[in-house]
Amino acid sequence: VRWSLGWANPNQAGAFLAACLPPFWVARAVSPRSRSTQIAWIALFLCLELILWFLLAKTYSRGGLVAALAAALWFGFCLRLTDGKHARHTPGGQASPDKSAGWAITCLPAVIRLVSIAAIIIITGFFARMEPARMRDDASAANRLTLWQGGMEMIAAHPLSGWGSGESGRI
């Protein structure tokens, strides 16, 4: 049973949950904290994030999962570009000189996160929803291809002026 969490359908819930994940990543990356509380903050943010991943998995929204994973990859890429500078600063603005704790604080949560997300996807049965045989027989996947093709044909026919608001169904 797909969870809609009070939304009109599970895909809306999935989109909402996918949009709720990045603020946790940003908060964890930029929140000023001392070394003594850093692990507690990481654990708190990770637990809250994994709850959101679990709820997302229970919606079985493939689009929500793809959006969340794409956002995670983009955020990781952007964080890597900044070399994680925000994540390693103490409240006084000085970079932490302790390099030995660096791996445990930066890489270990990422490994735990990836393993946990994979486990959530498998345990909830979400992975079965992505099997090629199931997707081949799923009308929603086939209908999307038809809609995308029709959309491309509409764009090609009137690329600058469009068709007008509410006219796509009739066209």
Image (spheres, grey):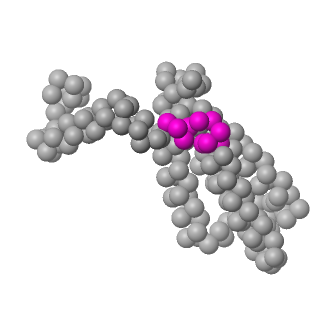
Q: Quadrant of residue 92?
A: bottom right
In this rendering, does residue 123 appear at all?
Answer: yes
Residue at image coords 47%, 41%? 130
| Residue 124 lies within the magenta run | yes
Please state, as top left, top right, bottom left or bottom right, where the C terminus lies in the image: top left
Which quadrant of the figure contains the N terminus? top right
Foreground residue among 47 and 168:
47
Residue 27 in magenta stretch: no
Residue 55 horizontal/vertical position (percent): 63, 34
- Residue 138 occupies which quadrant of the picture? top left
Q: How many marks?
A: 0
- Quick check: 116 above or below 137? below
Residue drawn where x is 76% and y is 65% of the image: 105
Query: Overall secondary structure of the magenta stretch?
Result: helix
Residue 94 visible: no
Residue 69 picture location, percent across and down: 53, 50
For the view shown, which residue lies furthest in the left direction? 157
49 w.r.t. 166: above or below: below
Left or right, 95 with respect to 162, comes to right
Q: For this rendering, which residue is in front, 44 or 109?
A: 109
From this viewpoint, which residue is outermost toward the right?
36
Q: Residue at x 41, y 38 (%)?
A: 133
Judge whether 95 appears above or below 125 on screen: below
Residue 129 image offset from top left, x and y in percent? 49, 36
The span picked out in magenta is 120-129
Residue shown at 84% from the left, 53% from the top: 40
Q: Left or right: where does residue 36 sit relative to residue 27?
A: right
Across and down, in percent, residue 101 comes to 81, 71
Left/right placement of residue 97 relative to residue 133 reads right
